[in-house]
Image (spheres, helix red, strand yellow):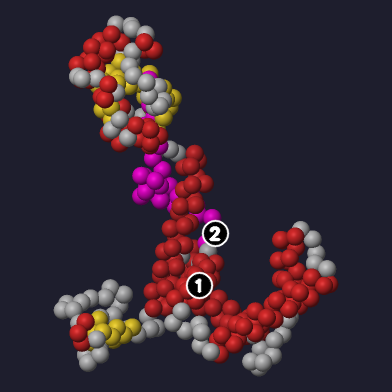
Amino acid sequence: MFNLKRLLREPLLHFLLIGAGLFLLFEVSQEQIPDAPDRIVVSPGQLEQLQAQFKRTWMREPRQQELDELIKGYVRNEVYYREALALGLDRNDPQVKQRMRLKLEFLLEDLTAEGAPSDELLNEFMQQNEERFFIQPQVSFQQLYLNPDKRADFDADAKRILKQLQQGAVVATLGDATMLPHELTQASQNEIRRSFGETFAADVVKLPVGDWSGPIYSQLGVHLVRVSKHTAGYLPELAQVRDQVERDYLAQRRQQLKDKAYEKLREGYEVVIQEAATQKVAGAKFTGGAVAATQADEVSHK
């Protein structure tokens, strides 16, 4: 039985669409650039593009004199562009190659664009990438800081002050001054890490709720901590994070299709790597589909 949905997911179909798109782009470009190298045509479409660009910048239509200047600028660019091509200035220029690569990648991205994914696909994507969407544990806590530079035996001081806190001592009368927050509410592990460091963040989420605990160590010193609320981490329902999941899924899917399109294009090229005999390295390998070779012993691969 003919399955249209399966056909639409077939990579070969995407490659055919890419080829058709490139062909259409070539045909359009042939209409824009005339055969005669000394003839520059400013088409109605180009005029509309110049006017639209001016309007986006200045929020109004260009006057006739301004439009004339835009046309002169376009013609100047075209003259320089064609003369630079005639001189071969585009060859072996890494910046030109990079820009052309980016333009082609944008084109491939447009040609391989897909519609909105189903909930089934997004749920599957979430399960395969739980670490991206997992809601971290959240903790509400108070902390009292002890500065090791001001205390000869801060471990002994921490135990003594902890006992006082557990017996109901006023927090404000104990501890040392610090720029660290004295209290955080429903803070994730990442938020805690930014203020107190990795070790403290990993330890504080494991503390029991209720009484004062410690000492808990950080790069800044010693802390006594009272956790008032702890919310366990969880993987949310799709409805809660659908926009994020869809963005990530489509970005990954576009990249996969672009990679497949590249591999298809790559099949049409032979890559040859030449090295001077004095630079030959035993066992040298090239993972892009070619093998390093000396000028005397050239090797090429499709």
> Residue at left 49%, top 63%?
5
Q: Which residue is mark 2?
A: 115
Q: Quadrant of the C terminus?
A: bottom left
Q: Which residue is mark 1?
A: 99
SS for dot 2: loop
Whichever of labels 2 and 1 marks the residue nearer the N terminus, that label is 1
- Along the line of sight, which residue is nearer the eye, 22 or 17? 22
Residue 140 sits inside the magenta stretch: yes
Q: Is residue 152 above or below residue 135?
A: above
Percent of width and height locating residue 266? 39, 78
Percent of width and height locating residue 189? 36, 34
* Neighbour tally class for label 2: few under 14, some 14-19, many 20 plus, Cα within 10 Å: few
Q: Amino acid at mark 1?
A: Arg
* Neighbour tally class for label 1: few under 14, some 14-19, many 20 plus, Cα within 10 Å: few
Question: Which residues fall within the magenta stretch?
Answer: 114-142
Q: CA distance from mark 2 to mark 1?
A: 28 Å
- Along the line of sight, which residue is nearer the eye, 17 or 278? 278
> Residue at left 25%, top 90%?
295
Residue 15 appears in the figure: no
Percent of width and height locating residue 184? 42, 25
